[in-house]
Amino acid sequence: MRKKSLLVLVALSLPSLLAVLAASPDVGPGAQWWSYVQYLASDKLEGRGTGSEGHRVAADFVAKHFQQDGLTPAGTNGYIQPVKFYSRRIVEEQSGLDLVSAGKTEPLRLGDDAIIRAQVPPAAHLRAGLVFIGYGLSVPELKYDDLAGQDLQGKVVVYMAGGPSSIPNALRAHAQSTGERWRALHAAGAAGVISIANPRHMDIPWPRLMVLRFSPTLRLADPGLDDLAGNRLVVVFNPAQAEKLFAGSGHTFAELIDIAERGEQLPRFPLVVSLDEHAKYTQQEVTSQNIAGILPGSDPALKQEYIVLSAHVDHLGVGEPINGDRIYNGAMDNAAGVATLLDVAETLHASGTKTRRSLLFLVVTGEEAGLLGSRYYTFHPTVPLAQTVGDLNVDMFLPIFPLKQLIVHGLEESDLGSLLKEVAAKEGVEVLPDPAPERNVFIRSDQYSFIKKGIPSIFFSFGYTKGSPEEATVKQWLSNRYHAPSDDLQQPVDLAAAAKYDKIVLGLAEAMADGDQRPQWNPDSFFRRFAVTGGQ
Ligand SMILES: [Zn+2]
């Protein structure tokens, strides 16, 4: 964290100034919540990187509070479930990407033009033809297939993030997940992937991605859980430099962006340039922690069923400095969400409230690396998955203005949407559908690990309507603070709004746990299939 200057303090509004200066954890709505955030996002915990000492200290803090709040340990070692990861880094000085056409070689600048990601161990040396495959999506039930008719055997495929508007939002989000996309590409014989973001929908501007590339990439050590098996190269291309890939192809990237903006299917075609790659990487095994505790239910029959309250505690740790600050504190992402879970556990404990079903408080690691802690949990559950009947996930809900509206991801997928509407209405809060479905938030946090196991899930954050000042505030937050060291304790936070949010989380958790019927997927939900097939 950079040094606090007086200038920073006077620039803050009064409520945020109070938030920054809040010392007593027992005063005012949200003060308890804020005290948890203050600890978890303090510099002492060094950004809680997966596998780091700071994360371990955070896990102990969560476990200690679970114990104080009377939760039964539900890890494999007390409250803790250890999770093993590989931590990989690309050695850029010994790696390179060249574009080759007609005997001419054009070296790409790693960082400026493209980034080799360590999600898979990159091939030591790979020469491959390139094929542009549109969005790279294959959705058999809609007879939609970007791969059809293309020879992908041994090729590195180039795709643009996104999908056509003919595919419904939730399904489009699912089809774009790493594992789903790779499954079809792998079956078609592809050797690797180059992705290009649509520059009009980038959460994180390229210069910040360039900086983030120096952080290690984490993957689950369990080979059975690797959803990129067989992939030999993962590259992210700078959209501002992407025309290089399309030279001589008869298409331009600018033209492809226009088609994507119209929501249409993109053309697919072989590229004229081919790729020559070489790479070196380092790898070490690290252990991190999920933390789990149970508040047993009161109903003799229903207590065998579990409602999960999940939130990730990991963030990006210590990384490349921005404005002299190396610690990625992750205050809103997601010390805030863990603080909400602790707040809910504390409130239930203090009031002695017991729900009919049991509540599983699950704080997970490895979310930032690709929902890995929750994925690990759902393959190594500590209570039977068949009796795990719902997940309420809390992640980066952004209490940075008064809470009047909520954006719900998966609103139309299960009866949890209408349940949330009832709970929120009691607090005078309106429930809105997702205003930015192209951001794919539905598959970007830990609820997705549960969804893929067939478990109805919900996830919601502070809402706003298009064109409102709140929308501008969120957009600004995303481009300035999201995954940057400035997501720290020196930012405007609305404590009363956070307290109201926590009340809604508690209310929904109680409603989910007390209902006669367990949460149900809607009959027409795409995601219902995982409940039928037993998940993936
Ligand atoms: Zn994040």
Image (cartoon, rainbow, N blue to C red):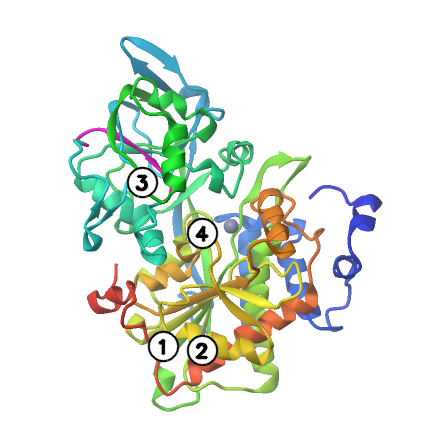
List the residue tagged with mark 2. Answer: 419
Calculate the distance from the C-alpha at mark 1 to the C-alpha at mark 2: 9 Å
List the residue tagged with mark 1. Answer: 519
Q: Earlier in the sequence, mark 1 or mark 2?
A: 2
List the residue tagged with mark 3. Answer: 135
Q: Position of residue 28 (x, y in %)?
A: 74, 73
Q: Nearer the viewer, residue 165 or 222?
A: 165
Q: Quadrant of the C terminus?
A: bottom left
Q: Mark 3 falls on what kind of element?
A: loop
Disc 4 marks a residue whose amino acid type is: Gly
Disc 1 marks a residue whose amino acid type is: Pro
In-image side of 196 versus 471 (left or right): left
Q: Residues within 10 Å of mark 3 (few under 14, many from 20)?
A: many
The number of numbered discs placed on residues in the rendered structure image is: 4
The verdict on label 3 being within 8 Å of ligand 1 is no
Is residue 370 in sight in this rendering? yes
Q: Nearer the viewer, residue 236 or 53?
A: 236
Q: Position of residue 204 (x, y in %)?
A: 53, 40
Which residue sits at x=35%, y=67%?
Answer: 413
Q: Position of residue 395 (x, y in %)?
A: 51, 59
Q: Mark 1 falls on what kind of element?
A: loop
